Image (cartoon, helix red, strand yellow):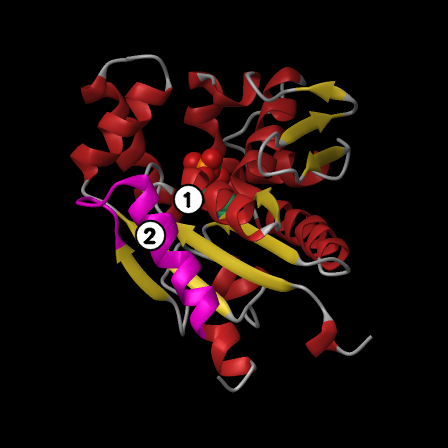
Amino acid sequence: MSSADRGIVIAVDGTSGSGKSSTSRGVADRLGLRYLDTGAMYRALTWWMLRHGVDVHDPEAVAARCGEPRIVSGTDPLAPTITVDGEDVAAAIREPDVNAAVSPVSAVPDVRARMVALQRAAIDEARQGPGIVVEGRDIGSVVCPEAPVKVYLSADAGARANRRAAEEGGSDVGATEASLLARDRIDSGRAVSPLVMAEGAVHIDTTAYSLDEVIAQVVALVEQLESIGSGS
Ligand code: DC
């Protein structure tokens, strides 16, 4: 099979709470594609580090153990799953202790090398079929720079905090905003694969749009590409 015959990759990067997950899942569902949440993978590894008493602020300690857990992502956009050594951690990885520790763990180069390898394997598998929507921070820049559709989502900090707090069942919006901004700072400032807008990415500021409107904009980008490909 030549690379042109393989399924599409849609890279969706952006800050926490910009609407990446809902948009990516919606686009995958509309287009019949798989879906990979790479943030959940970094969260799962962080959860394992906390459970095993690894000091998440010691990069060498994190690097030494980051190859141990077996992290498996289910890629159905309507029911994504994540397990660590067979244990379902979908809820546990959204807890405040993981929120607070995930950015320093994600900044460790050995962690990124391992996660990127796992992500590329999942992408390769999905490309045997129609393809995959992959969300994260470095998908268009590092994990899959050849993706034909790259989207960078952003939104005002207040809007992001309101959305995230609502998802978390009405938690304190001020505290949620502070936690989002702290993660943005580390994710954008780290030495390896910082959050950046990838070359060729289309920037969508989602502040003023509904979820359906953002999904429609991304689907339109894919359709545009397909109509160029078919010459119509
Ligand atoms: O998307 P999220 O908020 O669940 O991501 C959690 C953290 O994982 C985020 O603060 C940074 C890290 N992350 C990353 O470094 N690279 C990715 N591709 C995805 C997430």
Report the residue marked by disc 2: 153
- Drawn side of residue 40 relative to residue 13, left or right: right
Question: In the picture, residue 9 is in which quadrant?
Answer: bottom right
Q: Position of residue 38 (x, y in %)?
A: 56, 43
- Drawn side of residue 3 relative to residue 214, left or right: right
Is the C-beta of the residue carrying label 2 under 8 Å from the nearest atom of ligand 1? no
**Residue extending furthest toward the bottom:** 231
Instruction: Looking at the image, tell me whether mark 2 or mark 1 is earlier in sequence order.
Output: 1
The answer to whether residue 211 is magenta is: yes
The answer to whether residue 45 is magenta is: no
Q: Position of residue 143 (x, y in %)?
A: 58, 60
> What secondary structure do most residues of the magenta stretch adopt?
helix
The residue sitting at 52% across, 87% down in the picture is 231
Answer yes or no: is residue 103 visible.
no
Report the residue marked by disc 1: 23
The N terminus lies in quadrant: bottom right
Q: Amino acid at mark 2?
A: Leu
Q: Tag 2: Cα neighbours inside 10 Å, few (<14), some, or many (≥20)?
A: many
Which segment did they paint magenta? 205-224
- Drawn side of residue 144 relative to residue 180, left or right: right
The residue sitting at 47% across, 65% down in the picture is 222
The residue sitting at 73% across, 35% down in the picture is 72
Q: Position of residue 29 (x, y in %)?
A: 54, 44
Question: In the picture, residue 70 is in which quadrant?
Answer: top right
Which one is in front, 45 or 131? 131
Label disc, if present, on residue 72 of the rendered structure: none
Is the C-beta of the residue carrying label 1 under 8 Å from the nearest atom of ligand 1? no
Which one is in front, 19 or 216? 216
